[in-house]
Image (cartoon, rainbow, N blue to C red):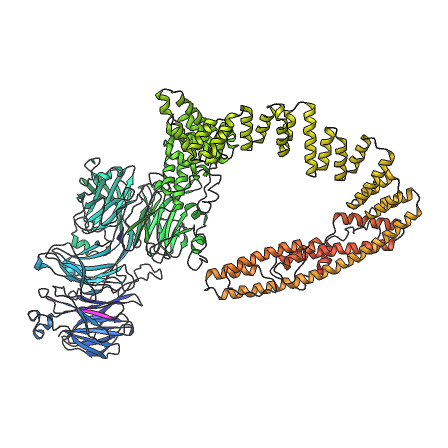
Amino acid sequence: MKNLKRYLELAYELPLRSSDETILFSAFDVEQNRLFFASSANLVYSLRFPSTRRGEPWSESLLPSGGELIAVGDGDSITAVDYLMEKEALVLGTSNGYLLLHTVDGNMTEVVGRVEGGVKCISPSPDGALLAIASGFGQLLVMTHDWEVLYENTLQIPELDKNDLYDMDSTSDQFESSISWRGDGKYFGTLSGGNDVSHSQKIIIWERDSGSLHATSESKAFVPNSLDWMPSGAKVAVACDRKAEKKCPSIVFFEKNGLERSSFSIDESMETKVESLKWNCNSDLVAAVVTCSGYDAIKIWSFSNNHWYLKQEIRYSKEDCVKFLWDPTKPLHLVTWTVGGKVMSYSFVWMTAVTDTSTALVIDNSSILVTPLDLSLIPPPMSLFNLRFRCAVHDVAFFSKNSKNQLAACLCDGSLCVVELPATDSWEQLEGKEFSIESLDFDVYLGTLSHLTWLDSHVLLGVSPHNLQVNGLSRQDLMEQVHGYFMYEIELTCSENAVPGLVTSSGWHAKILRSLPLEAPVIGVVPNPAKKHSAVIQYDGGSVFEYSSNVDAPRYFHKLDLNTGFSSSCPWLKVVTVDDHGIPGTLVIGLDDNGRLYAGGKILSNNCSSFSLYSNACGSIQEAVTHLILTTRQDLLFIISTNDLLLGKVDLQIEKCTPGHIHSKREANREYINIWERGAKVVGVLHGDEAAVILQTNRGSLECIYPRKLVLVSIINALLQGRFKDAMLMVRRHRIDFNIMVDYCGWQAFLQSATEFVSQIDNLGHITEFVCSIKNENVMESLYKNIITLPCPLDTSPMHLNEANDLGSLGKVSSVLLAIRKALQDHVQESPVRELCILTTLARSEPPALEEALKRIKEIRELELAKSDDCMRKSYPSAEEALKHLLWLSDTGAVYEAALGLYDLNLAAMVALNSQKDPKEFLPFLRELEKLSPVIMQYTIDLRLRRYESALKHIASAGEAYEEDCRNLIKTNPHLFPLALQLFNDPGKRNQVLEDWGDHLHGEKCFEDAATTYLCCSSLQKALKAYRDGGYWRGLLTVAGLLEFGNDDVLQLANELCEELQALGKPAEAAKIALDYCGDIASSVGYYVIACEWEEALRISYMHKREDLISEVKNAAIECANARVSEYEEGLEKVGKYVARYLAVRQRRLALAAKLKLEERSINDIDDDTVSEASSSFSGMSAYTMGTVKGSGTSISSRTTSKARDMRRQKHRGGKIRAGSPGEETALVEHLKGMSLTETSLRELKSLVLILIMLKKEETARQLQRVGDSLQLWQRAAVNLAEDTVSSDFVDEKAHTLENYVRKLKGESPDRPALSRVLIPA
């Protein structure tokens, strides 16, 4: 699916010294990219070509040098030339048999040997170590580069028929033979016999090392000098004359064993001759000089899909005696020369034959194979239909706009043809047909135009190395002009009206509107879609200009801005329109020979092999391009949004996916697609809803893939345009999650379009499939999150928003299905399929609306039993069919329970029978229910279905006989107590319910709620017990008052409460009871001291003037202060130890991390999984962990599990720190944070300092205050140090010290009040 385009043509003229001097031979110097020519006057000319590797453009300085005379004897002449890279010199053979070594740079010639019979052919081996020479006597000599002969053989073989042998003495001047080496140099081949094609010859395969005969072919009329071995070594090509068979010559391919493999005819007349034959260095093109009746031609064939295509034909006059050679290093560079010294350099490029409208136009000789790929994916040489021209096609251009399709073709003889094609939707009628195309009328000889480009339907651009705007000159005169580059704007008119549905080519006339000289050779011309009558032109070297056909413009060419050009020549050039945030823009994309892909003046990739462009617009490519598709030399396919391209997010994305940057096979490769066959390239795309990329493999077959990203883009685009039916077809065809049709703009937005969705789909089967796939998940944020993210503009009216909010209160699944169900009911005609679809929406709701579905089935059943008219029956399925459909969608047990919940035993039996339940399981139960009264039946069913609220309502209405069952139901299900209070109005029953509720709460240890409930039903004794069990002494003593307890009882109760509260850890409350109810001042003060309520204890002691109690309070305060001082001093010591330990652990961990990082850099070639595991294992290391870089997934998992287990154990053990454990560092930091003083501790400490001051113990208070302040300050400093070092990869032994952080905290707030400085000066 490719065409060979001639994109650059350079002409040179050798300065021959006389008119009768002719060019005979050539040789190529690969190192300096120059070509040598030997003439009949024994002169050698050199010509250097521009280097594409260095980005050197064509310039006039690259002119051929003057000839250097080779000193040969009188009557002697040069008969063979080749270049030896090892000697950096030319080796020449003469007719007298001399071998000459000519150093070009030094202009020195020396004789290195002589061959009897003259030298006819020189061929160095591919490695340059050997030199094969054929003599005029039919001898084959193989020598080293030191001119030592290894062996000598005769080119005649004994097996040849005697009638075919030549008299070598009499015909030595006629003997010709070509020598061709295999690419690896192990074998070389020759032809036996002379240059008379009337005699049969054989191909002889020789072994390099021994010179022995390896194989011979069968005898055929081979053409001399046409033998050439494919560089890859697979085949030997040779031309075969078939005049005896009255057929045209053919190209025949042989294997190294001499067996014929295949052949093809050159498709010319019988009198045609093949002069020479050569492969290019990639072995994918074979070229031959073919002599026809009126001209000579160089024909170039390529092989694909088991077919040989004639891709190019370059014609010359017979007087030129044209010859050619391929560039040894550039497979698409061909050099031709004539005997008169005219040298032409042709640079070819493989261009995709697929146009922007996905139409394939494959050139094959005089035919163009036309296939619209959006209709059928037909690989060439097959096609939908064929356009036949009078000679080989040179270049082709296609125009398609508004159903108008035109094709322009330039032929190898200079003719121009225009074909008008019908609209593409009628091309299926042209299948299998061939159309003969006529050439148009032109006033001047057109020549072979390159870079054909349509400006509009009647204006064509073309580039030629000749000035065509010359009338009255013959073709020969034009060919002899000085070569220059001109652009021609050609106006096309048609005198005949096109016939709809037919292919027409007659009646076209051409006129040159404008002829403009060009500054340099042009390598690309493409239309500019952003402007009418405009094109973008690229010169050799990469500079880009815009051509405008506006006659009012003062300049036809103007250079585009610097962000558009390229730093090197880009044969593959595209100019497209893009949508730059709502503003139309132009993007110039180019690809050079070295794989650099440019876009907008930036290099996107350095290893690109092909690219194409995709537009999600439905129907026409004239819309803005949305995606760039490219393949890399690593066989990766990227799909890049033009939005990302404009934002510059692409180059890093592509480079990180090269083999050197792909770190793990487990990486999500959503950014690219692995191409399954090496070397496959993208040749085209199918735009719009097709969303396909067409790849062609090296063997020629076509593969059509549907990248998930493009498919999602096309689906989203269709949904945004409201084309739900097209979106549904794409979702089903490509097996995309149906939820994308709901989630593309949020399911709330879909609710507004549910009616339109149902109307457009118009296929209840598809709607049912859609309904069954809806789930409570936003696939745009989960499944397709990393593939596509598209903003969704919402423009909805308030009325629609309110409606969506009403539906959306149920959740995604239920809301969507409810909207679909309403649309089905309101806008779809009643039918059995519609009813089944409605049942599906009910069954798939969350939770399933099975009761409503069963009600609909029940209505259908009632209609059947009522024997309604046939019209009603046709609108609904049978009840059995509907029920089976519901059972298929839902859990049979849930449907059976829902049927029971309707209290319809007949319906329940029907469900059970259709769900294949065993009658023994349900019939006895249904029969028992049938015997019960309706209320008790409903109660029994509710109990079975665990619908306890409904069961309570039913049993409560059953009467006094079931009162005990009612109480048991309530007790068994405590959540029914509130409902029971609503159902019962009788005070006795209400009190009984309340008492039962209190008992339940008391059993659940909700003592305060139980007591409150008991009080509601006046059960004071139970309330008293509930308060006492819960320790609520205020409520307890209040209820005791309600029960009118005596003083002794209250006193006894108070004493018991004091003991109980002290045991519960509430001494302050016990102190209050002892003082208020017992009058025990000593016990009250004692309880306050235990509670550390120092101020209250001292207040009561002074209030009652108890010196003994004051002394006890004083002694207890001093003792407590001394204990706190010891505790805080111990805390200060622990802070210092923990910080020192933490810094040591942290430094060792950082040192270990640096060491592992250094080792990781030195083992980049280790398996990616190993590196990943080393990283994981390091995360669980402590400073004392012995680890290696390599590990296994199992060990990592076990380490992670054990780490989590150790953390849990540490937590349960009260924060114990295990030295050397993986979590030691974290545990130390957490322990330091936990050493801060709590609000309760601070409050108690402040109270203690205050009471010491009151008791004249200022020194003790000052000491306590100082130690408390220090502990608080050092703890905060330690935490700050830990937080700073945890987030850093470096520990400074001088800066990261506890003393520095303490000073820093003091310096930040020197006036900050200390712990109790307001009470006593420090």
Quadrant location of the C terminus in the rendered image: bottom right
Viewed as shown, does residue 1112 lie left or right of 191? right
Residue at left 53%, top 25%?
Answer: 932
Q: Main secondary structure of the magenta part?
A: loop
Can residue 429 be seen here? The reply is: yes
Compared to residue 161, the image places residue 732 above or below, namely above
The spot of residue 130 in percent (x, y) is: 25, 74
Compared to residue 281, the image places residue 758 above or below, namely above
Viewed as shown, does residue 1208 lie left or right of 825? right
Tell which of 748 and 1033 is nearer to you: 1033
Residue at left 54%, top 27%?
Answer: 938
Compared to residue 675, the image places residue 825 above or below, namely above
Tell which of 228 and 345 is nearer to you: 228
The spot of residue 104 in percent (x, y) is: 27, 72
Can residue 543 be seen here? The reply is: no
Residue 209: quadrant of the picture: bottom left
The spot of residue 1155 in percent (x, y) is: 56, 66
Viewed as shown, does residue 503 lie left or right of 821? left
Residue 182: quadrant of the picture: bottom left
The magenta stretch is: 176-198
Residue 978: quadrant of the picture: top right
Residue at left 87%, top 36%?
Answer: 1048
Tell which of 1121 and 442 is nearer to you: 1121
Viewed as shown, does residue 1021 lie left or right of 678? right
As for residue 190 lying within the magenta part, the answer is yes
